[in-house]
Amino acid sequence: MGDTLEFNDIYQEAKGSWNDGRLRFSKQSIVYKSTKTGKVDTIPVPDLSLAQWRRVCLGHGIKLSTSTGHVYKYDGFKDSDLESIAAFFKANYKVELVEKDMCVKGWNWGTAKFTGPLLSFDVSENPVFEIPLSNVSQCATGKNEVTLEFHQNDDAEVALMEVRFYVPPATAEDGGDPVEAFAQNVLSKADVIQATGDAVCIFKELQCLTPRGRYDIRIYPTFLHLHGKTFDYKIPFTTVLRLFLLPHKEQMFFVISLDPPIKQGQTRYHFLILLFSKDEDISLTLNMNEDEVEKRFEGKLTKHMSGSLYEVVSRVMKALVNRKITVPGNFQGHSGSQCITCSYKASSGLLYPLERGFIYVHKPPVHLRFEEISCVNFARGTTTTRSFDFEIETKQGSQYTFSSIERQEYGKLFDFVNAKKLNIKNRGFKEGMKGKDDMSDSDEDQHDAYLERMKEEGKIREEGGSDDSEGDSDESFNPGEEDDDVAEEYDSNASGSDSEDDSAGSDEEAKPKKSKPKKEPVKKTKAPKEKKERKPRKEKKVKDAGAPKRPMSAYMLWLNASRERIKSEHPGISVTEISKKAGEMWKQIGKDKKEEWDKKAEEAKRQYEKAMKEYKESGGGGGGASASSSSKKEPKKKAGKSNDKKKSAEKEKNVGNESFKSREFISSEDSSDNDSDRGKKSSKRKHSDDEEEEEIASTPPSSAESGSD
């Protein structure tokens, strides 16, 4: 058997609520550490006087009693643990682990026994239930009746409010009233605070941040009394978990962590925060003689003390509470301070990195121990790139986000978290950014596997497109030419005016004749013609099934080789998460390994080019698409030319049927106007999809006559 026995998920009852933790048995002591609060209970082996193994609600439990009167109960053991624990007790402790049965008859009539801090209700010498008297907040008596009220725990789903005991009328052993004797036994061990006697010392008008206000603090031997203008608080020293002394510029925060918290209505204060100025001094005299001070505090305090106010208060609290004072460690921010300015829940405050955790002051105060932190995350600020967010996720699933941290603090905070070996959620991404002063708002610094693949495919498609375009015929569609023609038409249209149509003289006739044919196609050369002629371009996108496959990039080659390894290292990972994880891993690969994959990618590309060349020489691919497109266009053009001849013949017939007019008559203004109107009508009737047909249709009759002459 080893020197220690350790059990996880062991529960300890705390005012009606179960808190889990870890219990360790060693040869020197028994230590229990709460997971929720981190509080450590240590039982020295020489003080152990009683050990019982009992069947309880959460399986099996152990009840331990000490010679000093303390009782500790731990539940959550398995039935199989009894043998190992009993053997360990027998070998290392002087106390034997005894099995004790509980009474489950359901009787409500029995004997009340006061054993140390417990009130045990027994039936037939077996306990039915036990009440820790430290949980009693009030004890009231009546005729043959005693009522016990209990402290409430906010973490408990169901709380016990009170218990009433009926005490039969009889004479007590000392001849007194049995009801009063019962009540005195309860009050002697109950956690009922009564401000009796003189205070050890008093501090006047201290500034409190939580609860807010100025309070006179009276320090008694067993509790702390805060007296304000509106509220009073009595805080037992047993509820104090930790003490913190935090510097900030010319001020000092003195923080007292409490469990259970102090209450005011529905508000709970888990922390008592006092604010001091470093320049404020005090001279204090304890309300005790020097012998009592020396005997009680063993040199930690003296009867007369003087110095800074925060130093005197912290010394007195440390001696009375018997707790260490936690101060910031070696962390220093960008400005040289030991804290980081940030915001939490829309309130600005200070985040202090400690040796074993983080504490945020002051509204609301938060204390997070490293052992309860699951991971941390560095995130960009949501409103500006000049700051970032620091997220902390606990093992219980709670998340705390400290925002608006200046980007200059990033390096110091990252080094601190890394040195404490906390799990950083986005370690790969942040290590790449470490050392950069500018935290850009773009995502270019993250490797995008999909974007990388699309870029490579685009490059290869461009290369393939340039090769295919060499086989296209001259008759293939060229959108640039038509665009130029349209642009010229709009330019000429802008320079021309309608007033030129009414001008006289043969020299001015040419202007309307040139502008009119250009106006008509502008109105009718819209999207339909371009859409019809651009359709053959889609044939280029048809893939040739027999053509060689395009080569993969270096990243894709590496990804195909590493995919199974990533799946085995991260079971259950999804396809998208594989790509994301692969991008992070690819970014962390050294230059030497990347060069190997780059060489493989270049070799694959050379093989592809060679195979593509041989494929084209053998008659595959080539200008097949362009040839088919040109063959489809030729019949259209032939049909267009035949239509042109028909239309020109019809036009000559129309001109021949008209009566002969002399040149002088033709040059008159009336004839030119009539001819131009007739030319407009004929151009509208003879409009076609081809541009050559439009020019013929828009030619004025005068030009047709001159051609016939």
Image (cartoon, rainbow, N blue to C red):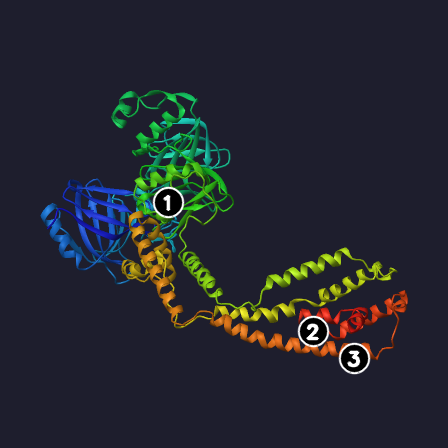
Of pointers 2 and 1, the one earlier in the residue sequence? 1
Establish if 14 lies above or below 681: above
Do labels 2 and 1 touch, CB within 8 Å? no
Callout 2: SS: loop
Residue drawn at x 9%, y 48% is 91
Front one among 464 and 71 = 464
Q: Is residue 53 left or right of residue 472?
A: left
Of pointers 3 and 2, the one earlier in the residue sequence? 3
The disc label shown at residue 623, or none: none
Residue drawn at x 12%, y 50% is 88
C-alpha span from label 3 to label 2: 20 Å
Q: Is residue 515 left or right of residue 486?
A: right
Q: Is residue 575 left or right of residue 74?
A: right
- Quarter of the image for residue 452 reads bottom left
**Amino acid on which disc 3 is placed:** Lys
Q: Is residue 352 visible?
A: yes
Front one among 146 and 707 = 707
Q: Position of residue 224 (x, y in %)?
A: 38, 34
The disc label shown at residue 432, or none: 1
CA neighbours of label 2 inside 10 A, class few (<14), some (14 to 19), many (20+): some
Establish if 187 lies above or below 668: above
- Quarter of the image for residue 547 reads bottom left
**Amino acid on which disc 2 is placed:** Ser
Reading the image, the residue beneath label 3 is: 653
Reading the image, the residue beneath label 2 is: 688
